[in-house]
């Protein structure tokens, strides 16, 4: 039997999560998203420093260029992606100004984090309203082979001492070294504007464990053409 959860998050929109795909009803248009389509959207959204066409995105997704183009064109027709011609290539960005698309990205981010419930539990004490908790690095890909556990926190400077104490408590129960980078929202934004390569890579690969709204409020400002 196919298991599913009906989740009416927003007025006029119904989200149905199944084991393998989403069905999203937008007004009178039904959009079904496969895992690979979800992966494509997140990849384009999170990689704020690059533009992708069908060729470059296909290499990242591990599927054919033809298959990637079908995904991109479908999203463009649905107004989920916007396109722009640069030279001879047509590149794509998430149409984040659309309210539905904002909610769609938020939903996919939350779904991605649901695959990391162990780490949401481990780092729950680090979160509070207005704070962002990102999980990244080798432990997010393959914990058994990782040498340490990487977490990035965006928080108020006044909370650093309190957070340091909580980090010590968490470290005492973890078998691997916990490496936590802490930054204020202002530092985070400044590093993005300065095109800091390390920061851009963290954004590109990190899982948002907590603070989806605050995370998107920042990243949305860097996703448009």
Image (cartoon, grey):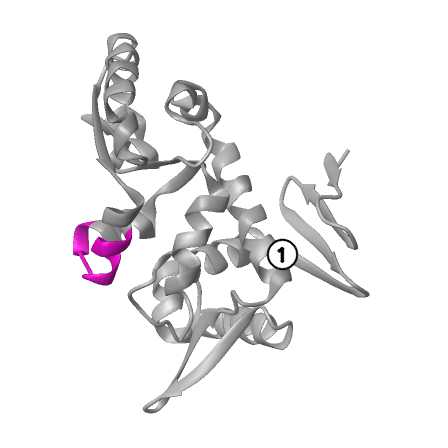
- Point 64% across, 60% down: residue: 100
Residue named by callout 1: 33
Q: State the image quarter where residue 33 is shown.
A: bottom right
Q: Left or right: 194 with respect to 128? A: left
Q: Left or right: 26 with respect to 38? A: right
Q: Is residue 62 visible?
A: no
Q: Left or right: 135 with respect to 39? A: left
Image quadrant holding the C terminus, namely bottom left
- Point 22% across, 18% down: residue: 176
Image quadrant holding the N terminus, namely top right
> In the depicted view, which residue is nearer to us: 12 or 112?
12
Residue 172: where, in percent of width, then height?
A: 25, 8
Residue 17: where, in percent of width, then height?
A: 68, 42
> In the depicted view, which residue is nearer to us: 105 or 90?
105
> In the depicted view, which residue is nearer to us: 27 or 125?
125
State the predominant SS element of the stretch in magenta. helix
In the image, which residues are magenta?
Answer: 189-198
As drawn, 89 above or below 142: below
Q: State the image quarter where residue 123 is shown.
A: top left
Q: Left or right: 187 with respect to 68? A: left
In the rendered image, the residue lying farthest to the bottom is 88
Confirm whether the magenta stretch covers residue 184: no
- Point 31% across, 35% down: residue: 156
- Point 18% across, 26% down: residue: 147
Residue 209: where, in percent of width, then height?
A: 43, 34
| SS at mark 1 in the image | strand
Residue 208: where, in percent of width, then height?
A: 42, 40
Q: Is residue 157 visible?
A: yes
Confirm whether the magenta stretch covers residue 197: yes
> In the depicted view, which residue is nearer to us: 153 or 54?
153
Q: Residues within 10 Å of mark 1 (few under 14, many from 20)?
A: some
């Amino acid at each position: 039997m196919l298991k599913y959860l009906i989740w009416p998050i927003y007025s006029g929109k119904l989200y149905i999560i199944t084991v393998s795909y989403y069905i999203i009803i937008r007004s009178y248009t039904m959009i079904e998203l496969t895992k690979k389509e979800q992966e494509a959207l997140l990849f384009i959204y999170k990689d704020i420093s690059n533009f992708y066409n069908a060729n470059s995105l296909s290499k990242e997704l591990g599927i054919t260029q033809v298959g990637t183009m079908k995904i991109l064109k479908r999203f463009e027709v649905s107004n989920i992606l916007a396109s722009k011609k640069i030279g001879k290539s047509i590149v794509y960005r998430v149409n984040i100004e659309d309210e539905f698309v904002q909610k769609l990205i938020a939903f996919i981010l939350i779904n991605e984090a649901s695959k990391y419930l162990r780490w949401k539990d481990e780092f729950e004490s680090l979160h509070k309203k207005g704070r962002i908790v990102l999980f990244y690095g080798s432990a997010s890909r393959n914990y058994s082979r990782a040498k340490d556990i990487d977490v990035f926190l965006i928080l108020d400077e006044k909370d650093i001492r309190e957070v340091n104490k909580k980090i010590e408590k968490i470290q005492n129960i973890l078998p691997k070294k916990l490496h936590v980078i802490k930054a204020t929202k202002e530092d985070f934004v400044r590093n993005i504007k300065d095109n800091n390569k390390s920061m851009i890579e963290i954004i590109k690969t990190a899982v948002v464990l907590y603070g989806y709204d605050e995370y998107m409020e920042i990243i949305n400002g860097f996703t448009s053409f």
